[in-house]
Amino acid sequence: MAHIPYSDLGDPAAIALVDQIVAERGSVLHLYQMLLHSPPLTEGWLAFLTAIRQKLELAGSLRELVIIRIAILNGASYEAEQHAPIALAEGLSQAQVDALADWEKATVFDRVQRLALQLTDAITRDVAAPPHLVGEARDALGTRQCVELVATIAAYNMVSRFLESFHIHSTDARP
């Protein structure tokens, strides 16, 4: 159960954003219903995360790989639940999704995926990645996609921290 009540989707200040979220995402997930307590925050969040999810050159499979790993590291089950079907749709296998909790022992990840997971672990656990990992990511992906990967890792750490700070779960009842 969330630590504070979810926002009222009928609030006149939120109607336009509710319509936008439904149009872009299909429904108002628990995350957005919490964010809607602050319409300006929700508006910025949507713009930023839409760019991360839909406008980058970074492969969707790599994006979803790191998102689920972040969710596991941060104990953000809601985030992992929401992104598992997306990861499969982006081309990850069920075996890869299942192996993310203990990825270092798994044999289902290629060199670039393993590098992205190393970078994810470093940034999530230690805030800053060691320079050699950033250099390896730049060499493997190019400068733009390296920047996009690090930004994705940073963004989804923000998401999981928000979710867990409010104790948001997909089983929560909402008004």
Image (cartoon, helix red, strand yellow):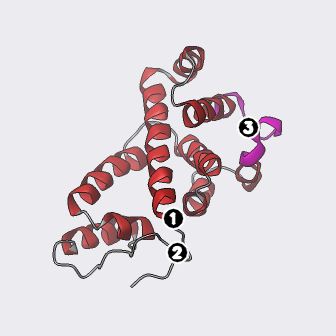
The residue carrying mark 3 is 109
Q: Which residue ends up furthest to the front in the rendered image?
A: 3
**Residue at left offset 59%, top offset 20%:** 133
Give the CA separation, mark 3 to mark 2. Answer: 35 Å
Q: Earlier in the sequence, mark 3 or mark 2?
A: 2
Disc 2 and disc 1 in contact, CB within 8 angstroms: yes
Q: Quadrant of residue 82?
A: bottom right
**Residue at left offset 59%, top offset 49%:** 74
- Judging depth in this view, the residue of 54 and 39 nearest the camera is 39
Q: Position of residue 7 (x, y in %)?
A: 32, 75
The residue carrying mark 2 is 1
**Residue at left offset 25%, top offset 63%:** 38
Q: Position of residue 123 (x, y in %)?
A: 55, 32
The vertical placement of 164 against 156, above or below, is below
Residue depth check, mark 3 versus mark 2: number of the one nearer the observer: 2
Q: Position of residue 5 (x, y in %)?
A: 39, 76
**Dot 1 crowding, Cα within 10 Å, few <14, some 14–19, many 20+:** some
Please give the range of residues in magenta: 100-113
- Judging depth in this view, the residue of 47 and 143 nearest the camera is 47
Q: Earlier in the sequence, mark 2 or mark 1?
A: 2
Secondary structure under tag 1 reads: loop
Amino acid type, residue under disc 2 in the picture: Met
Give the CA separation, mark 2 to mark 1. Answer: 7 Å
Amino acid type, residue under disc 3 in the picture: Phe
Disc 3 and disc 1 in contact, CB within 8 angstroms: no
Could you tell whether 155 is left or right of 18 in the image? right
- Judging depth in this view, the residue of 98 and 165 nearest the camera is 165
Disc 3 and disc 2 in contact, CB within 8 angstroms: no
Report the disc number at residue 167: 1
